[in-house]
Image (spheres, coloured by chain):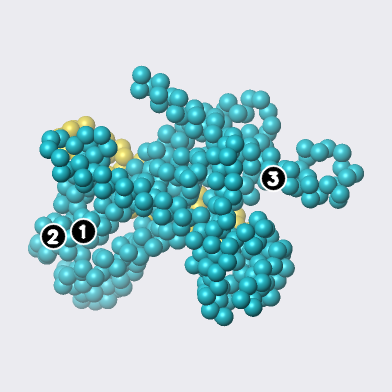
Chain colours: A yellow, B cyan
Amino acid sequence: MPASLGAGIGAGLAAIGAGIGIGRIGGSSLEASARQPELYGKLFTLMIVAAALVEGVAFFAVVVAMQSK
Amino acid sequence: MTNNIFKFLLLSVLFINVGIISAQHDAHGETTSHNEATVEKNEEAGHDEKFNPSDLINHHLSDSHDYKFDIPFFETTFYLPVILWTDNGLTVFSSSAFKGDEHGEVVVTKNGQKFVRIHDIIAYADKVPEHAKPEEITLSQRPLDFSITKNVLSMFFTFLIILILLMYVRKAYNKKGVPKGIAGFLEPLIVFIRDDVAKENIGPKYQKFVPFLLTVFFFILFSNLFGLIPFSPFGYNLTGNIVVTFVLAVIVFIITNVNGNKSYWKHILWPPGVPVILKPFIALIEVLSMFTKPFALMIRLFANIFAGHTIILTFITLIFVFKNWGVPFASGFATIFMYISELLVAFLQAYVFTLLSAIYFGMAVKEEAH
């Protein structure tokens, strides 16, 4: 029971971190492409890559949390 | 016009889905009531059999040796071949020998050995304790399983569709003029992968990698999309199976490191621009990140598709949990919403996997600029 509680709290904290990260990435890429719409394609690729990296860290947390049944 | 077709498709997809699950729910209820009829005779409420949504969802998403062909009104089960590498060598038999049993009760004797099936795992009957859970079975208790399971068959099917489509596209270029139809639909995707993903991220040596990137992109895209169509022969869970994504990630890892040039290995083992004292530590981190990159690729694809399927199935099982007239409407809308977001995810994850593979190849191949 305590282990799964800890796993749940840990996964939740990781989700908070990933949420903040992806929100900031999305927000600033939106701002940037509003300023310079001609760079939209490049900014979109950069956004996806950065979001994927943030997401990757969150997935590591999920995997670690899944280990503690 | 197109709007109406779209609405019709979404609604029909939803109803087929509910139909399939309710059919399975009924079948499940019948079997349990049939088996436990004698035991639970004093229990008057006949519809009180326990409906366990998580069991149904897990059963839906896991691999199996029987192929349930579940188009409504045409439900049949195909028994697929079981191919095992056991202590006595190769053993092949049909999965109909298990008679649909998944709880280790039917013992099959073949080639001088006894096998039981627990969920989708085939194990030695004499080595596994009774009522063992699938996650408790160790590798020494089970033979190596090379069976053509539901997922393997679905993979063959996906390959066949991709082959037919792309051969058709290739043929369309032998004629004169602009390609029409399916070729016209797939051309932008192919050009997009070649120009915006491969050329952009790998650099001048991109041509070697384009075939792999295109193959991976179309394989992931089509298995994601076919996984969303809720009837056979579609409706499988291929990219939501961690073994499939593991193999894809291993292939990316091998291609990256085989093609790594001098500057790639130098950046990993003796990173430039770092104080000498720090170099071993940075190198350690770099070596670790060599493995974590494909690991993240594997987990990302698996988790996205698996979570999407689980959420859709959860919304639908809510109907059978609450048994209330209002719930089907709510869960219907929620399912339509999830289906639309899953369509986006299907394209996005195929794109992200291809893009990140291209970036890793680019890291391995690019010459040092500074």
Give percent across and percent down for residue A3. Answer: 60, 60
Alpha carbon of mark 1 to alpha carbon of mark 3: how far? 48 Å
Give percent across and percent down for residue B204. Answer: 11, 57
| Mark 2 Cα-neighbour bin, 10 Å: few <14, some 14–19, many ≥20 | some
Of circles 1 and 3, the one toward us is 3
Which sits earlier in the primary sequence, circle 2 or circle 3? 3
- Mark 1, residue position: B209
The quadrant in which residue B181 appears is top left
| Mark 1 Cα-neighbour bin, 10 Å: few <14, some 14–19, many ≥20 | some
Chain on which label 3 sits: B
- Which residue occupies 50% across, 43% down? B232
Q: Amino acid at mark 1?
A: Phe
Chain on which label 1 sits: B
The N terminus of chain B, quarter of image: top left
Q: Is residue B59 left or right of residue B242?
A: right
Alpha carbon of mark 1 to alpha carbon of mark 2: how far? 8 Å
Q: Amino acid at mark 2?
A: Lys
Q: Is residue A27 left or right of residue B13?
A: left
- Which residue occupies 66% across, 25% down? B325
- Mark 3, residue position: B28
Tell me the element at label 2.
loop
The quadrant in which residue A6 appears is bottom right
Give percent across and percent down for residue B42. Answer: 90, 44
Residue B118's disc number: none
Q: Residue furthest right?
A: B42
The C terminus of chain B, quarter of image: bottom left
Alpha carbon of mark 2 to alpha carbon of mark 3: how far? 56 Å
- Mark 2, residue position: B205
Tell me the element at label 1.
helix
